[in-house]
Image (cartoon, rainbow, N blue to C red):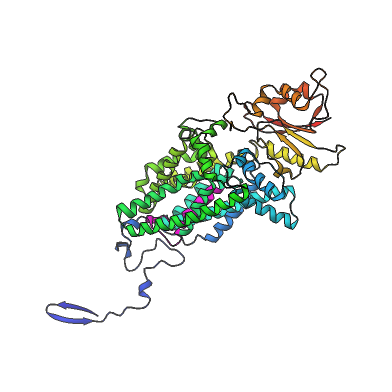
Amino acid sequence: MQYIYTQGRATLNMARIKSGAKDKNKPTESGSKNKPTESGSKNKPAESGSKDKNKPKEDKTWDEPYLHIFLITWRLVNVMFVQSWFVPDEYWQSVEIAHKHAFGFGYQTWEWKVGIRSYLHPLMFSCLFYVQKWVGLDHAPLLIIIPRVAQSLLSAAAEWKFYLFLSNTCGRYFARWAMFSLLTSWFWWYCATRTLINTFESNLVCFALYYLGCDQYKVGPNYSKFIFIAAFAFMLRPTIITVWLPLFCVYFYYFCLAKPDIAKFVFILFRTTILSTIVFLLSTFIDMLCHGRLLSVHFNFFLFNIFNNKGTFYGSHPFHWYLTQGIPTVVGTHLPFIMIGIYNKRRSNYHVYNLCKLSILVCTFTVLVYSIPGHKEFRFLLCILPFLHILSTCGLLSLPKRCRHIGILWLLLTNVPMAIYTGLIHQSAPNKVMKYLREDLTRPTSTTKTEIMFLCPCHSTPYYASLHQNITLRFLTCEPNLDDGKDYLDEADIFFSDPVTWLEQEYKLNKATRQCGSLLPNRLVMFDVLYDKLEDYFTQCYKVCFSTFHTHFSEGRVGSHMLVLCRL
């Protein structure tokens, strides 16, 4: 009832509210987002305040399940179009260790003997190998492809969670643009299906962000899952703390300084401590069983890489390398949009602005910490790649519509050729050589013993996990100076300083006649730069039976082609 008093006379008006009038201002399911409502909701202030005023409107026509199917299909296609070599850890620190664990033969590098690696990542692939072994599908081609397919599905699931996180935080409109930015990244295409621990680390970051729900720094019901994933990622690689620590500091500021809620912060700290301790104990127990002794791989990792800084044995870079080379290479032509996003972040709505600030904080802190050790690699930046593409999306959406269309064309024209070239052409020889050797081992031969020697820079090819044959394989080792000896040279350096002398001493060849001794291996694998120097020496005992292109950018010990020499 509504009473209206006019000129001292009271008039009673009965206002009957129809049951359908309440939903008159609600958008229809068909999503006519621009249609004005009858009640004039245009002038009605938003219930959530000015913070939600600029939040992108939802597009109800976007069918999310189809995105999930698309991501799975996209990554399976990605597996077929990435057949190149990136870094040794893709094989030697994952599937090679898993192969030895499941089948009893394989090669363990010095990292596992010293104890600076956790078995958590290789055990994932060991489980796959055990299943293949039990069902009789332990054939070399399947042992190669199935781990990569598993990793591609993990990447697709991580991308899906990343989309849901952004959709819940900033709206579907922003989330769709962020997915476009991520899926057009040549570097993510290059790494998303590789069995690298850094790729898996990036997947865990996406899963953790989804469960965290960073919107306005609220702690959602899935916070325990976030802590579990964050602790698990730390057990895999302690350096991921550079991503989690800024998030924790944000919560500390919010609950203790900005809007004090000490009780809630203490509860969060208590839950975090309990769950992290449980994950730590489980991880330590697994590593103790696999290493065969009680040790802390995280302490050993810190001691080797940070305190002793022995990682510089595999290359040292200046402090500014990540800023001047690392990030520009990893993000490629997305870099201008990242810079625009950082500059124009204040023009975004409240939710996007908060997320951009958080992304800048995580990226800045991670790059600063990673710049301290001398040894640096592009793949180390994979853990902050989602945050970089959040900033790229902010930059794209801050542009006028016409400029945005030009930006789309620019990203496609620059990233697609780069993805194809790096995935199928650049550094493609190692996998082709291993395929040839795998097929060569199945051919009937007159030799009773097969031995393959890799006269390449150490870890230049996959190993037992790619051949799946328990034969004699040798390569030039390159272990660091673990005993701190003076004038230390690894085996690869000794060989390349004087290849002929090394071969004669190793295989007891006659220096005068240089006759082919019986100790020489059946197959030699090398780059063309070595063969060109010693062609006269090798042609007495070997012939080139396979040659394949490797790279257009040959440098030092790595040539443009890789060769397989067969014993005469």
Q: In the picture shown, does residue 152 fall above or below 317?
A: below
Question: As drawn, which residue projects farthest toward the right?
Answer: 446
Nearer to us in this view, 207 or 298: 298
Left or right: residue 131 compared with residue 229: right
Answer with the quarter of the image where residue 213 lies: bottom left
Q: Which residues are magenta?
A: 200-223
Question: As drawn, which residue projects farthest toward the top?
Answer: 512
Q: Main secondary structure of the magenta part?
A: helix
Residue at 83% in and 25% down: 516
Question: As drawn, which residue projects farthest toward the front?
Answer: 294
Q: Residue 440 location, x and y as percent?
A: 80, 40
Q: Residue 563 location, x and y as percent?
A: 73, 31
Residue 179 visible in the snapshot: no
Q: Residue 201 location, x and y as percent?
A: 53, 48
Q: In the picture shown, does residue 122 fall above or below 218?
A: above
Residue at 33% in and 56% down: 51
Residue at 38% in and 49% down: 249
Nearer to us in this view, 285 or 328: 285
Q: Residue 480 location, x and y as percent?
A: 59, 32
Residue 318 visible in the snapshot: yes
* Magenta-drawn stretch contains 204: yes
Quadrant the C terminus occupies? top right
Answer with the quarter of the image where residue 455 lies: top right
